[in-house]
Image (cartoon, coloured by chain):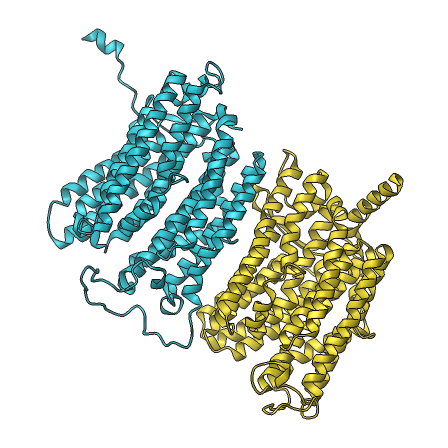
């Protein structure tokens, strides 16, 4: 016995570094237990409050752990924290908080049960945190599944609606294919490099393993495909519009933002760290993927009349921009991607919050018509939506502009100047659908006298939420306003975000 | 020497508009107009303070904005933008006044967008950093998109979407070009977008050429020049008068200003390389605009097409790559702004008095009943057709001198444009003022608002006609230094050709 203990050393665990993860997992278990109690107060106030508290605590601890420079193992050989992981975790927590707020009055919570709903949400966030900090391929896959499975359930949250069930099932099937592909790719990478550890892989590639090794390249291709499913990079994006449309909108917004951030966090780590020496091999291929994604995403969004579908396609296009930052494999590219992810969070959360507010009161649901004349009826919602659309289109004085500027600068500096032009052309196409949203909100006919909107009180209609009053959903409006304010703020004063991002840039020591 | 903080000049309108949003509309309106008048005051002080023959930038503001990207917050004034800033400041006051008095639908929002537009335009003129210029250049589109789309007439949503997409396609290409310029010229060193730094750095000829095309796309659409003018007709029809005034008089100048400020000094080899192409475009614009202006029934469209011709003149001057030509071009930018603004106000006044739709058919016979209107119209008409004694005469003659200097053919065709301008301007004047009055025309003298909007600008036109040296003396140094690199490059390629022969 004594001998065994000496041979098999328990991994060193840094509990302080692990604390945020404890907080989200613990919170997840806690809300599950609390949710067992019936009663309006527990279901509608206590459970969300505990979930929000767990996220806030995790956030606080993440800030306390923040330290620029090299990575520090928290579970040796499995999980580490570096600034990239911490930065991405912050984005997950922020999105999580926004999702909690956006779900407060959503009827999906009642259908699933508040406890289960929040527990799944926190579970998915824990998975993302694990994914962002993964140090080897096994942990990577564990995190990947931990984030995916709760989301399969959540996107089928409206258990009595065929649409939502279809979304859940579709997501499950496509997601499983993606996971399987990823797993296969990881296995081949292990076969090629002889290690599951990222650092060891990085050392092996170009040293003991040639960058043209067929096993390695097949592994890279399959891993990239698996991640592309999750990040909805074309041509692996087909599930995105359907799932986004069918899922409950707060979950859609969470998937659109947090899942994409998680997918790019791990893509950055895998490609720009573990596989960075093979950049000459995968760079052109990913650049081609990015181009296809930008074109398909933007073209697909044009024909949409549902806002959720439109944002899904726009998310595909944005994934293409983000991928461009990965392609160059430089520190500048890493920073630009991280910056754009943060900008992407604010822009999309603002847009989804407005969609949620309007779909609850409008007979058009999430159709673009639900926003008609919002500029008159409810400027407090119309402005955030306007800012979000302008930012997504890349107008200056928004974080979206700075983000795109940064990305283009990174790709040009990384000898991919043509990819910069592709980004720009994509933005041009995107104007068509982003501007249509703005035109619907502000440029309706003046002649028509509108009833005051939103109506003070709307009776519960079959299947509609009873609190169909935008003034009665201040938390949704405030999420929209805060996110839009952040979009503008970081568009004019980007330095605070830049400081964080330049810390992130130090995560991978080997990058130029 | 005064201390003028350009940041205050640039952001004063926006700040006032944000403050006004919190106040009742009646008070807020005057606050915004007051702030714009304040900017005008600043502009006049700058002109008075600016000594003729000054070289280099004055009132420089230079701070870090995004140091990670090499972007600086750099503002400055020299001979090149001094009068364009003044033009902006001058024309925004009557336009906003007009809008504040006439627009009853969501007035606060209208004022906010007007103020944002002025801030963006002033920023674009003052910017001494390429990235900052791009920011303001693109930002400019946002308020105009809303102004046309919300307060326009006719098919306004279609018009504004077209306007935005056309101009933003150009702007986004320029964004890519600007970043490429900054990164590639650094050659691995510190990335900088400052004009002063970029002018010192050199780029390979091939790189210069594709970057030139990206910039030209933005500036030619903005101007607009033939064949990039697809947005013009819809926009000029739909845009509300006060917005059209600044759009046509000022915003179109930002594009051609970009050629002088950015393209010639930073991409001299490419400018020389594309010189003939640009001249051909300029000459085509002159002919195309003039001919179409002659056949339009809507007065707004007459001015729209005449603007295309005028901007063709300006580009002709710039790409003659001579001191005289570029100086004339700069003079003509100011002149065109000064005459177009009262023209649109006058057309609005005429339309209000016309029987039905605002076409020449429905106007006429106004001169006897409304002599002040007729007199002002005549002054502006003469200035537009470059009658000797008008500032436009000085501008056009300088441009033609510049063109004749080396590119005789283009100059000769350009002269045709001057002749045609007389034809279409006199036509619109006669048909609206002298013909027999149409059945429903209500000839009436200008109201006080109309007079307040038109008279001061017309007075400036007359004053500049009398004393064009005010502009010429202060701009000469700046235009000469900006043209010099391209001039050298053109000279070098010419001598290569003659050697080859």
Residue depicted at x 58% and y 84%? B352
Residue depicted at x 48% and y 26%? A276
As drawn, A301 above or below B206: below
Residue depicted at x 22% and y 62%? A467
As drawn, A209 above or below B199: above
Q: Measured from the top left, where is residue B441 in percent x and y?
A: 60, 90
Q: Measured from the top left, where is residue A85 in percent x and y?
A: 38, 33
Chain in yellow (letter) = B
Q: Is residue A111 left or right of residue A392?
A: left
As drawn, A219 above or below B229: above
Say which quarter of the image contains residue A10.
top left
Q: Measured from the top left, where is residue A214 in percent x and y?
A: 44, 20
Q: In this orientation, does residue A126 appear?
A: no
- Nearer to us in this view, B437 or A510: B437
Residue depicted at x 44% and y 75%? B24
Q: In this orientation, does residue B468 appear?
A: yes
Question: Which quarter of the figure is the C terminus of chain B placed in?
Answer: top right
Instruction: State the hue of chain A.
Output: cyan
Q: Is residue B58 left or right of residue A351?
A: right
Question: Which quarter of the figure is the N terminus of chain B placed in?
Answer: bottom right
- Nearer to us in this view, B166 or B25: B166
Q: Is residue A59 left or right of residue A150?
A: right
Say which quarter of the image contains residue B7.
bottom right
- Nearer to us in this view, A314 or B65: A314
Counting every numbered tag in the picture gives 0
As drawn, A300 above or below B499: below
Q: Measured from the top left, where is residue A47 in percent x and y?
A: 19, 47
Direction top: furthest residue: A3
């Amino acid at each position: 016995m004594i001998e065994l203990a000496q041979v098999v050393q328990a991994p060193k665990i840094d509990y302080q570094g692990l604390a945020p993860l404890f907080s989200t997992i613990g919170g997840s278990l806690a809300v599950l237990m609390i949710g067992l109690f019936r009663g309006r107060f527990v279901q509608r106030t206590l459970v969300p409050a505990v979930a929000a508290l767990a996220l806030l605590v995790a956030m606080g601890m993440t800030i306390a752990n923040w330290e620029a420079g090299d990575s520090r193992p928290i579970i040796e050989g499995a999980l580490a924290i570096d600034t990239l992981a911490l930065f991405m975790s912050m984005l997950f927590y922020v999105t999580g908080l926004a999702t909690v707020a956006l779900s407060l009055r959503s009827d999906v919570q009642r259908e699933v049960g508040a406890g289960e709903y929040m527990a799944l949400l926190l579970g998915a966030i824990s998975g993302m945190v694990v994914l962002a900090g993964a140090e080897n391929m096994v942990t990577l896959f564990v995190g990947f599944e931990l984030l995916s499975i709760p989301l399969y359930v959540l996107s089928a949250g409206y258990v009595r609606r065929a649409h939502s069930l279809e979304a859940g099932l579709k997501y499950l099937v496509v997601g499983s294919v993606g996971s399987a592909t990823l797993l296969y790719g990881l296995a081949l990478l292990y076969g090629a490099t002889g290690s599951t550890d990222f650092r060891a892989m990085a050392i092996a590639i170009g040293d003991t393993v040639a960058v043209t090794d067929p096993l390695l390249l097949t592994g890279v291709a399959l891993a990239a495909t698996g991640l592309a499913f999750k990040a909805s990079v074309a041509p692996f994006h087909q599930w995105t519009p359907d799932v986004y449309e069918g899922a409950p909108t707060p979950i859609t917004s969470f998937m659109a933002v947090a899942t994409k951030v998680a997918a790019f966090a791990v893509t950055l780590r895998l490609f720009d760290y573990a596989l960075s020496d093979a950049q000459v091999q995968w760079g052109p291929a990913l650049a081609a993927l990015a181009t296809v994604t930008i074109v398909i995403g933007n073209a697909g969004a044009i024909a949409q009349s549902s806002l959720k579908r439109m944002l899904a396609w726009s998310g595909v296009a944005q994934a293409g921009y983000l991928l461009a930052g990965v392609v160059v494999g430089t520190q500048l590219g890493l920073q630009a991607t991280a910056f754009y992810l943060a900008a992407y969070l604010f822009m999309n959360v603002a847009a989804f919050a407005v969609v949620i507010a309007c779909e609850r009161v409008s007979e058009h649901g999430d159709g673009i018509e639900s926003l008609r004349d919002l500029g008159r009826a409810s400027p407090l919602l119309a402005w955030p939506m306007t800012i979000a659309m302008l930012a997504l289109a890349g107008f200056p004085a928004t974080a979206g502009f700075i983000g795109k500027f940064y990305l283009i600068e990174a790709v040009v500096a990384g000898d991919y100047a043509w990819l910069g032009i592709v980004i720009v052309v994509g933005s041009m196409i995107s104007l068509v659908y982003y501007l249509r949203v703005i035109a619907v909100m502000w440029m309706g006919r003046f002649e028509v006298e509108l009833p005051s909107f939103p109506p003070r009180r709307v009776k519960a209609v079959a299947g509609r939420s009873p609190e169909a009053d935008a003034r009665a959903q201040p938390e949704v409006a405030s999420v929209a306003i805060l996110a839009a304010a952040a979009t503008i703020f970081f568009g004019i004063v980007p330095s605070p975000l830049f400081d964080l991002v330049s810390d992130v840039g130090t995560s991978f020591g080997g990058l130029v | 020497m005064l201390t003028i903080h350009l940041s205050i000049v640039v952001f004063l309108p926006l700040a006032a508009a944000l403050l006004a949003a919190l106040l009742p509309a009646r008070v807020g309106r005057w606050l915004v107009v007051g702030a714009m008048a304040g900017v005008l005051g600043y502009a006049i002080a700058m002109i008075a303070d600016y000594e003729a023959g000054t070289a280099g930038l004055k009132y420089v503001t230079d701070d870090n904005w995004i140091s990670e990207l090499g972007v600086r917050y750099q503002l400055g004034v020299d001979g090149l933008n001094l009068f364009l800033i003044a033009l902006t400041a001058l024309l925004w006051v009557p336009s906003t006044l007009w809008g504040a008095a006439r627009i009853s639908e969501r007035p606060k929002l209208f004022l906010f967008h007007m103020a944002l537009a002025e801030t963006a335009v002033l920023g674009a003129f003052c910017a001494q950093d390429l990235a900052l210029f791009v920011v303001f250049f693109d930002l400019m589109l946002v308020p105009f998109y809303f102004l046309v789309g919300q307060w326009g007439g006719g098919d306004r949503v279609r018009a504004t979407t077209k306007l935005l997409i056309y101009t933003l396609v150009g702007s986004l290409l320029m964004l890519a070009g600007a970043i490429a310029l900054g990164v590639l010229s650094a050659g691995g060193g510190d990335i900088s977008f400052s004009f002063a730094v970029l002018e010192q750095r050199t780029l390979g000829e091939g790189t210069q050429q594709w970057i030139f095309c990206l910039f030209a796309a933005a500036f030619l659409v903005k101007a607009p020049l033939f064949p990039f003018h697809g947005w013009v007709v819809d926009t000029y029809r739909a845009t509300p008068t006060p917005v059209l005034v600044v759009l046509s008089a000022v915003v179109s100048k930002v594009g051609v200003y970009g050629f002088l400020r950015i393209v010639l000094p930073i991409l001299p080899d490419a400018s020389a390389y594309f010189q003939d192409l640009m001249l051909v475009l300029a000459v085509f614009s002159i002919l195309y605009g003039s001919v179409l202006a002659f056949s339009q029934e809507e007065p707004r469209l007459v001015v729209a097409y005449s603007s295309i011709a005028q901007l063709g003149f300006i580009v002709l001057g710039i790409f003659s790559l001579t001191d005289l030509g570029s100086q004339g071009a700069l003079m003509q930018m100011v002149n065109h702004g000064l005459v177009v603004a009262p023209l649109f106000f006058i057309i609005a006044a005429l339309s209000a008095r016309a029987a039905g739709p605002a076409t020449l058919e429905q106007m006429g016979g106004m001169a006897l009943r409304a002599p002040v209107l007729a007199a002002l119209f005549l002054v502006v008409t003469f200035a537009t057709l470059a009658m000797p004694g008008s500032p436009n005469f000085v501008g056009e003659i300088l441009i033609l001198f510049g063109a004749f200097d080396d590119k005789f053919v283009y100059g000769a065709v350009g002269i045709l444009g001057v002749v045609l301008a007389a034809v279409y301007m006199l036509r619109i004047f006669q048909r609206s003022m002298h013909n027999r009055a149409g059945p429903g025309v209500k000839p009436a003298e200008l109201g006080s608002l109309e007079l307040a909007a038109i008279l001061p600008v017309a007075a400036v036109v007359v004053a500049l006609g009398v004393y064009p040296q005010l502009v010429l003396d202060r701009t000469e140094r700046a235009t000469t230094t900006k043209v010099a690199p391209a001039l050298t490059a053109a000279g070098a390629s010419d001598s290569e050709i003659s050697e080859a022969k």
